[in-house]
Amino acid sequence: MGKKFFIKTFGCQMNFNDSERIKGMLKTLGYEPTQNWEEADLIILNTCTIREKPDQKVLSHLGEYKKIKERNPNALIAVAGCLAQRAGWELVKKAPVIDIMFSSFNMHQLPELINQAQAGYKAIAILDEPPEDEHKIWEYPVERDNKYCAYVTIIKGCDKNCTYCVVPRTRGKERSRPLHSILDEVKRLVDDGVREIHLLGQNVTAWGKDFEKPIPFSELLYEVSKIEGVERIRFTTGHPRDLTDDIIEAMADIPQVCNALHLPFQAGSNRILTLMDRGYTKEEYLEKVYKLKEKVKGIAMSTDVIVGFPTETEEDFEHTLDVLEKVRFEQVFSFKFSPRPGTPAAEMEGQVSDDVKTERMSRLLELQKRILSEIAKGYEGTVQEVLIEEEKNGELIGRTTTNKWATLKGDKSLLGKIVKVKVNKASAFNLECELLEVLR
């Protein structure tokens, strides 16, 4: 009793949701959270391995955290998540300070791993595939960081075989969570004051395809929307191949589904998309975007882009810039290609030099900066609905339905409320607003 834990999370929203579950699990074991790793009895690094940079950051943090053993010899250091799954014992050899290691497959085994480590053993649980009892993780409470918005994981793994990606190896095949389990969690969250539900998955729009009797993802959207108290619904991340017409229709038809969507296109060149094994063309991607814009009023798009994939030419890169110009994304997560061990792309000939990647990335960011500036001007003078999520220094902070951060003056009584605001001034990443009325 009275022990403290510290979690450092890298990577995607799935990892942050996993960390919320780990926190809930540790609370049931009598641990309390701390923001200061130096006073922790258990330090957990929940890792990402989608690129090389996060791998290096983990090793750097482990080098810093090992100092805790000098002050508290009984303190435990754990590595969880995708790097743990990919590297396994190889990582333990590089950083012997690790006491516990587990992947997302083994998260529910954390209590017994802590017991093993406290008994003096290296507690390592890395399976090649998800165990049959993986579903036990849903039985643990979730310790959320946000009172009004909650992540709900609905599917794990990915069946796509993008040549640059380690997710199928680190997260396994697609495993959809049962419908009743999802709806039960949403009901509990709403009872706890949550107003916005964010459905998560490595390939969220593939949910339900692996059931004995398949259920379309669009049906899940309708079922979640029927739960009283659900004011907003978002979902991340879908693959363009799985964004079907019925999902677009559901987005247009269900009032609670936000007019914002993250849809990675990764590259604009059809030749590069083929090498990536993405399964669609630039034209097919743009056709889906145009359909979304036609059906879902005022939809804001965000995306992922890889710059400098093997053999990428200047002409190929120009196609990527063309997609940015045509779609006008409100947020772009852009990355220089990073070869991941064991992926086909890492072994491809024609690796692009870092100088070329850097130069192209600079041009992409410059173009996106201009587009964001133009989009921001379009927000000025408009009326938006904002869910107020926090108060800081007398200022209220929330998000529009288009997932844009907004700030306005007001008091704490508005926390958790959906308000109508007028946008007075807009920048690339924030809207300065004035309150018009409280809606609900």
Image (cartoon, grey):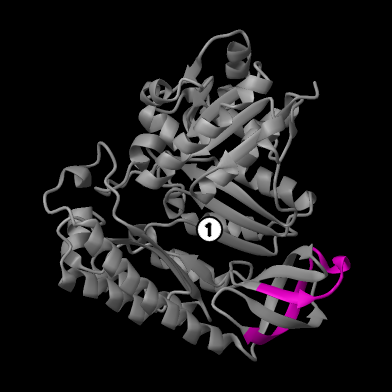
Against 254, residue 103 (above or below) is above
Tell which residue pokes out farthest to the left in this image. Answer: 349
Looking at the rendering, the stretch of residues picked out in magenta corresponds to 406-425
Residue 179 seen in the figure: no
The amino acid beneath tag 1 is: Phe
| Residue nearer the viewer, 100 or 299 | 100
Residue 426 seen in the figure: yes
Q: Position of residue 425 (x, y in %)?
A: 65, 86
Badge 1, how many Cα within 10 Å: few under 14, some, many 20+?
many
Judged left or right of residue 247, residue 234 is: right
Task: From the image, give the main secondary structure of the stretch colored magenta.
Answer: strand
Residue at image location 54% in from the left, 19% down from the top: 99
Is residue 411 magenta-colored?
Answer: yes
Q: Position of residue 82 (x, y in %)?
A: 43, 36
Quarter of the rendering occupied by the N terminus: top right
Against 19, residue 278 (above or below) is below
Quarter of the rendering occupied by the C terminus: bottom right
Name the residue beneath numbered marker 1: 235
Q: Secondary structure at mark 1?
A: strand
Tell which residue pokes out farthest to the bottom in this image. Answer: 381
Is residue 180 magenta-colored?
Answer: no
Q: Position of residue 239 (x, y in %)?
A: 37, 57
Judged left or right of residue 120, residue 144 is: right
Residue at image location 58% in from the left, 8% down from the top: 120
Residue at image location 67% in from the left, 60% down from the top: 196
The number of numbered discs placed on residues in the rendered structure image is 1
| Residue nearer the viewer, 101 or 421 | 101
Residue at image location 21% in from the left, 44% down from the top: 346
| Residue nearer the viewer, 435 or 92 | 92
Q: Position of residue 300 (x, y in %)?
A: 50, 75
